């Protein structure tokens, strides 16, 4: 294998590996040890990406989709073995038709109908359902001295909401959640060669399920997004094809819950690691929205996104060639001292916490941002109401799914009474 050609003058960090055990356990000490004041953009040979860390540079990338293509947003980080590639292609899983990896005008063709799922009216109309599911899930752990917040609430709540929105039967929710975990490993992890065939087989099954869901809804409509999208197809089959509807569902079924599972877990973790923060929210529930925004800045559930240059361009003082792959470190942007004062402090009174880039910016700004924040606010609100003395179980070792782009504790044990 030939070594990649690095842009002349670009700093190189040979040891930077976002899938190392050290980084996965806690990326922020890794971030703090880097000389970002001198090298806000550097090349990481382990992943063959240019790492972009400064808020202004990442914002520039998001606001210029002509220069910075989304084509690599969900491309496998590590090369796939031929057998896995063949299974994926045969199963209809290709890297391009999903909204997050499309550029204009194809991106707008899929995004425009998908926005129907996330209008302000529709999101606010979900409040009773979110509150009811939250109450039901927490009823199940009522009276227990301790429980895993992720399996009890952060995992099932957003999955139930987005899958119901799509019209997925409740009996199938666990299977889709499992498939979504495989998708994270495929696109944003580094699965071993022997695991790739199993992952590819699951991804093909995932695609096949969504195509069958669209076909079933075409025969019997319901009050759900899939049926709404089919209504657009009925008006003009070329405007939105059945395959494109399946692609929209593929995007939403993952992004609509995986990010919120992480956000709920990260928010509760950061509030409970300093019990005074939790106590303050118990006393002043009006601070809960600020706590969610500060978590998105301080410890985002999507810490990294990706782009690729379409032409030679200068970014962060580095002259990049066309085809340079960019690792947009959103978590680093949230700790940029040029934008956020005392960035390593978790501050519930921070006036500009909402300026974070955790949901991106520009044409690809996360469609489900308002829904994810709403679910997290309602979850924390009910937790503080029911468990005013909630605390972290001491001595637990947190673990995180080995991928670059979706981060939240896989388990978070809490105790209901100190």
Image (cartoon, helix red, strand yellow):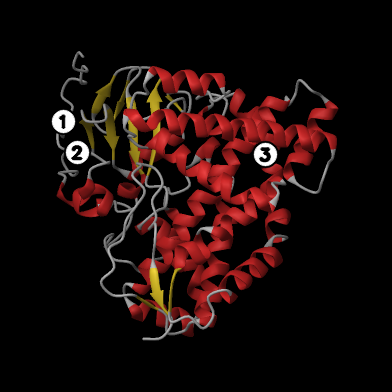
**Rendering coords of residue 353 (x, y %):** 41, 60
Q: CA distance from mark 1 to mark 3?
A: 40 Å
Question: Is residue 138 at all visible to an observer of this figure?
Answer: yes
**Which dot, 1 or 2, sits closer to the camera?**
2
Pointer 1 with pointer 2, Cβ within 8 A: no
Q: Do tag 1 and tag 3 residues touch (Cβ < 8 Å)?
A: no
Q: Secondary structure at mark 3?
A: helix
Q: Which residue is mark 2?
A: 16
* Label 1 SS: loop
Residue at screen point 18% across, 17% down = 3
Which residue position is annotated with label 3? 114
Q: Which residue is mark 1?
A: 12
Residue 233 in the image: state x and y as whole percent: 79, 29
* Rendered position, 217 above or below 33: above
Q: Residue at x 44, y 32 (%)?
A: 198
| Residue at the image point whose x is 48% and y is 50% from the top | 259
């Amino acid at each position: 294998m030939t070594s990649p050609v690095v842009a002349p003058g670009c700093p190189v960090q040979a040891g930077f590996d976002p899938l190392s055990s050290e980084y996965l356990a806690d990326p922020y000490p890794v971030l703090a040890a880097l000389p970002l004041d001198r090298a806000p953009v550097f090349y990481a040979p382990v992943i063959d990406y240019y790492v972009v860390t400064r808020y202004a540079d990442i914002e520039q990338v998001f606001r210029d989709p002509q220069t910075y293509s989304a084509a690599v947003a969900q491309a496998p980080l590590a090369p796939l073995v031929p057998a896995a590639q063949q299974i994926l292609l045969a199963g209809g899983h290709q890297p391009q038709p999903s909204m997050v990896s499309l550029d204009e005008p194809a991106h707008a063709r899929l995004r425009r109908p998908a926005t129907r799922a996330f209008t302000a009216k529709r999101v606010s109309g979900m409040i009773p359902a979110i509150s009811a599911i939250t109450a039901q899930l927490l009823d199940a752990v009522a009276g227990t001295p301790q429980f895993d917040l992720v399996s009890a609430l952060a995992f099932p709540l957003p999955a139930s909401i987005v899958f119901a929105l799509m019209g997925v039967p409740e009996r199938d929710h666990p299977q889709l959640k499992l498939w979504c975990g495989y998708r994270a490993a495929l696109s944003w992890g580094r699965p071993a060669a022997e695991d790739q065939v199993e992952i590819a087989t699951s991804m093909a099954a995932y695609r096949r399920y969504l195509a069958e869901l669209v076909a079933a809804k075409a025969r019997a409509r319901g009050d759900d997004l899939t049926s709404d999208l089919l209504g657009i197809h009925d008006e003009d089959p070329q405007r939105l094809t059945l395959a494109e509807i399946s692609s929209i569902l593929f995007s939403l079924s993952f992004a609509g819950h995986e990010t919120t599972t992480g956000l709920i877990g990260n928010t509760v973790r950061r509030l409970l690691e300093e019990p005074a923060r939790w106590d303050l929210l118990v006393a002043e529930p009006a601070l809960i929205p600020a706590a969610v925004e500060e978590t998105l800045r301080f410890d985002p559930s999507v810490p990294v996104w990706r782009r690729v240059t379409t032409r030679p361009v200068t970014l962060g003082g580095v002259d990049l060639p066309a085809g340079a792959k960019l690792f947009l470190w959103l978590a680093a942007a949230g700790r940029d001292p040029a934008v956020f004062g005392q960035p390593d402090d978790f501050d519930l009174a921070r006036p500009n916490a909402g300026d974070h880039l955790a949901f991106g910016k520009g044409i690809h700004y996360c469609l489900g941002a308002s829904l994810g924040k709403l679910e997290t606010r309602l979850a924390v609100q009910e937790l503080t109401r029911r468990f005013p003395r909630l605390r972290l179980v001491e001595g637990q070792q947190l673990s995180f799914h080995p991928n670059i782009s979706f981060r939240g504790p896989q388990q978070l044990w809490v105790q209901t009474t100190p």
